Amino acid sequence: MAADDVVQLTDVWVYYDSTPVLEEVNLAVGQNDFLGIIGPNGGGKTTLLKVILGLVRPSQGTVSVMGKPPEKSRRNIGYIPQHSLFDREFPISAWEVVLMGRYAGTRLLQSYSGEDRRQAELALETVGMLHNRNRQIGKLSGGEQQRVLIARALASEPRLLLLDEPTASIDTAMQTEFYELLDRLKSQMAIVLVSHDISAVSVYVDKLACLNGRLFYHGSKEIGPEVLEATYKCPVQMIAHGTVPHRVLKEH
Amino acid sequence: MIEALQYEFMRSAVAAGLLAAIACGIVGVYVVVKKIVFISGGIAHASFGGIGLGYLLGISPVMGALFFTIASALGMGVVSRRTKLPEDTAIGILWAMGMALGIIFIGLSPGYAPDLFSYLFGNILTVPAVDLFLMLVLDLVIIAVVVIFYKELLAISFDEEFGTVVGVPTERLYLTLLGLIALTVVVLLRVVGVILVIALLTIPAAVARQFTHSLKTMMLLSVALGGVFAFGGLWLSYQLDLASGATIVLVSGTAFLISAGYQRWRGRKRRPSPSASASS
């Protein structure tokens, strides 16, 4: 584990009531890593992201983000939560949503500064949504909303981007565009993306881990069938490089 | 109506209506967009305990209500955030306990509670000058808090989890918002009463929402609508000799139905086939 790791989890355990959600998780994310974490629903993927954000405190183990406790590093983390959480009908424009990403640098009574506006504009431009800045958030398509949320995360000029099931609400055509956007961003920041969708993730990420309570991580994209089987508790086709399609197979 | 304004009580009634419109217009917007109507109803009903306490101690029932609404707002907020008791259960308990305490306190008070009915159902025609002054002060407090914490209140209303991530003190702000609701309940108490408060907290904002996508515009529109409803209800109750609070609520509710119907009709006209509307 290098000293300049952006995220470092050591022997992290998380319990909800008495049920373990994360067990003995060790993870290191380097500066320009693009890490994909796959696993079944309920496997603890969202919890893992919340541990990195400091929203969930582990029962045991240590969490270090950019060399500090996670709560202190939040300013430098861009977080893109699962899409369905907010009210689409909320009376707010795309522009106001993105400005919220700049909140950490503002003070009470102070409105957003010229620099905040410039960064928000830049972020909207990066995701190609500047022309839609005045639209109400719910009037945008699923893919466009997703890009606005990415812009909100980018507006804070993050060193680490966390994405929770980012492709769940966008169609296949938009997904390619979305991953190409991440591909451009990964030179500027570390990216951690969690998903239950193995095929889409494995094409674009540099490193892949499997999570189902326990984290199986080998620091590369090659993951053997025994690991996937342990993660999904079912036989799974081998992960390969490139654009080979992968399928989860029924027991036979 | 103009000749009615020469009466002192009519002028106070109009002033009370406008002061009520400011509070319910601004705070009602948060209640509606953050979907905390039920907790607002709980705070409103819990205030009855304070009204009863006011009678029992011989102080102003409105001051008693102010104390009770703030205490119950903070109580419900802390219980729902820090314990595993579901929020709606906590609201139900405090709602009923506040009412029950009010009934017991009034029963224990010596003599007859003179204008109890006006606290339950409101009477905009009998608001004393001292209560008008209190309403004005509470309105100014509400405006000041919303101006100071506009960014923060927007953040916790839209996406509380993201707010936490970017460092908004979400729990304290949520309690502040509930405190604002408590103040609004007190402002509205004399106008529509404990039981009907929830109507003015929701209807003007709900109508305003149908016409705008900006929170600030929604607030201004909702204050204006609240004023129109209060004034219209007051006029109608004067003409037809009806209870003022209930008339204001019915005027508001009717306006909501008309505006919702209009929006539906307009939406259908814009998208003629029903299948085209499925995407939004």
Image (cartoon, coloured by chain):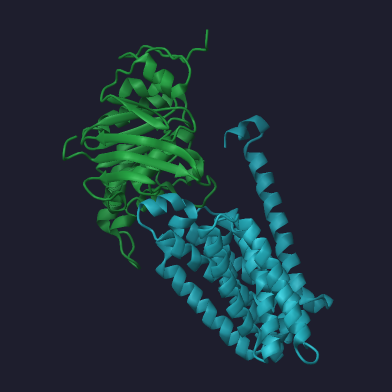
Toward which corner of the image does residue B192 lie, by quadrant?
Answer: bottom right
Left or right placement of residue A242 versus residue B221 in this view: left
Q: Colour of chain B?
A: cyan
* Residue A157: % across, % down: 26, 46
Asked if one can make out residue B159 in the rendered structure from this viewpoint, the answer is yes
Residue at 16% x, 40% y: name it: A3
Q: Nearer the viewer, residue A71 or A177?
A: A71
Toward which corner of the image does residue B73 lie, by quadrant?
Answer: bottom right
Asked if one can make out residue A148 in the rendered structure from this viewpoint, the answer is no
- Colour green maps to chain: A
Toward which corner of the image does residue B89 lie, by quadrant?
Answer: bottom right
Residue at 53% x, 70% y: name it: B180
Q: Is residue A72 above or below residue B128?
A: above
Residue at 33% x, 20% y: name it: A203
Q: Nearer the viewer, residue B132 or B79?
A: B79
Left or right placement of residue B272 versus residue A249 in this view: right
Quarter of the image with the N terminus of chain A is top left
* Residue A242: % across, % down: 31, 14
* Residue B86: % across, % down: 60, 54
* Residue A44: % across, % down: 44, 35
Tally the marks: 0
